[in-house]
Amino acid sequence: MPDLGPHAIYILAAYAVTFVALGVLAFMIVEDDRKQRRTLAELEARGIRRRSAGKMKRTKRS
Amino acid sequence: MIGLANPTRFLALVERLVPWLAGTTIIMLAVGLYLALFVAPPDYQQGETVRIMFVHVPAAWLAMGGYALIAIASLGTLIWRHPLADVAAKAAAPIGATFTFIALVTGSLWGKPMWGTYWVWDARLTSVLVLFLLYLGLIALWQAIEEPGRAGRAAAILALVGAVNLPIIKFSVDWWNTLHQPASVLRAGGPTIDPSLLTPLFVMAIAFALLFATLHLIAMRAEILRRRVRALQQTHVAHAALAEAEA
């Protein structure tokens, strides 16, 4: 990395804020997606399914 | 588009697209950061602080782009009643808010060494702060109304009213005297920035746009699944209550 001069602290802080914010956002979105998939799988495992899901499976088999 | 109105088909498409988008995002981010921090020369006026531009400007573009996407999706909710329109709008709000936050903070960090202050209440900075508050308002509205259809319609109206802020942000530097510099990339006469700085800027902008797209698709999938979970739980509770009443 080149010498960032007397304002290095501002440059590094800008990159740090950017990538921490994007990292937190990505983590929260991926975790939410996993949580919804897990909950749906648990419901389906208990036999609670969408009627349309059943129809789609029957259509695929036929 | 009509085929993708079916959430199940849309989920299958997301399943195929996300790994490719995520992989391309990581490669573009790595190339963009290398160009921004190691290859781009210092600016003749702003020195090394110009490197803040490579995160600030793409974040600002996506802050506005994200809101434009929400406004278009809101039209889809209110006019065409597209089943994925309010899912798309709701999923875009936290991502757009984060890019707006990044644009505000990195702008402040760039302003201190260049203008001598972190913040001034001028037209550009204030209108971007209003954009951030609009995003927060939309997120709060979706949280406050439990039924997704009603929440989507209310949020769509707020989003369309707030869309008037987008041209204000864009032209604020032309209409009023501001500390913020006028447009130097997306302007009628073409970019005024040297190609040695423009290339890393475009690479970072593509990387950020790909990241937005990747996260947006994952967030849309999560929202569709959340609605399915909600519907299943409601049906299950209703069936259980009916069975109890019959017994």
Image (cartoon, coloured by chain):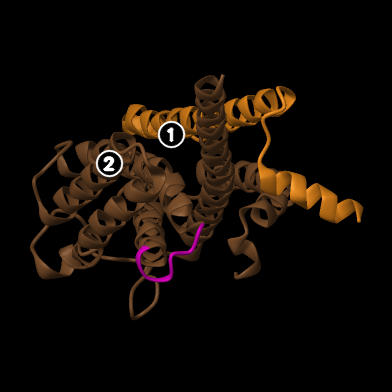
Chain colours: A orange, B brown
| Marks 1/2: CA–CA distance | 31 Å
Give the residue at x 21% y 36%. Answer: B112
Picture coordinates of residue B98, whole percent (x, y): 38, 39
Residue A15: image tag: 1
Give the residue at x 19% y 55%. Answer: B180
Query: Is B229 drawn above or below residue B121 in the view shown?
Result: above
* Label 2: how many Cα within 10 Å (few below 14, some 14–19, many 20+): some
Front disc: 1 or 2: 2
* Label 1: how many Cα within 10 Å (few below 14, some 14–19, many 20+): some
A15 and B128: which one is in front? B128
Query: Is A11 drawn above or below residue A60 in the view shown?
Result: above
Residue ranking furthest to the right: A62
A2 and B91: which one is in front? B91
Q: Is residue A30 magenta?
A: no
Picture coordinates of residue A53, whole percent (x, y): 72, 45
**Quadrant of the image for the C terminus of chain B?**
top right
Number of numbered markers? 2
**Quadrant of the image for the N terminus of chain B?**
bottom right
Residue ranking furthest to the bottom: B189
Query: Is B121 drawn above or below residue A31 in the view shown?
Result: below
Q: Mark 2 points at which residue?
A: B141
Secondary structure at numbered mark 2: helix
Q: Do labels 1 and 2 share a chain?
A: no
Give the residue at x 55% y 56%. Answer: B206
Give the residue at x 37% y 34%. Answer: A14
Looking at numbered disc 1 in the image, what kind of residue is underneath it? Tyr
Q: Can residue B18 be seen in this view?
A: no
Looking at numbered disc 2 in the image, what kind of residue is underneath it? Leu
Q: Is residue B74 visible?
A: yes
Task: Identify the magenta region.
Answer: B78-83
* Label 1 chain ID: A
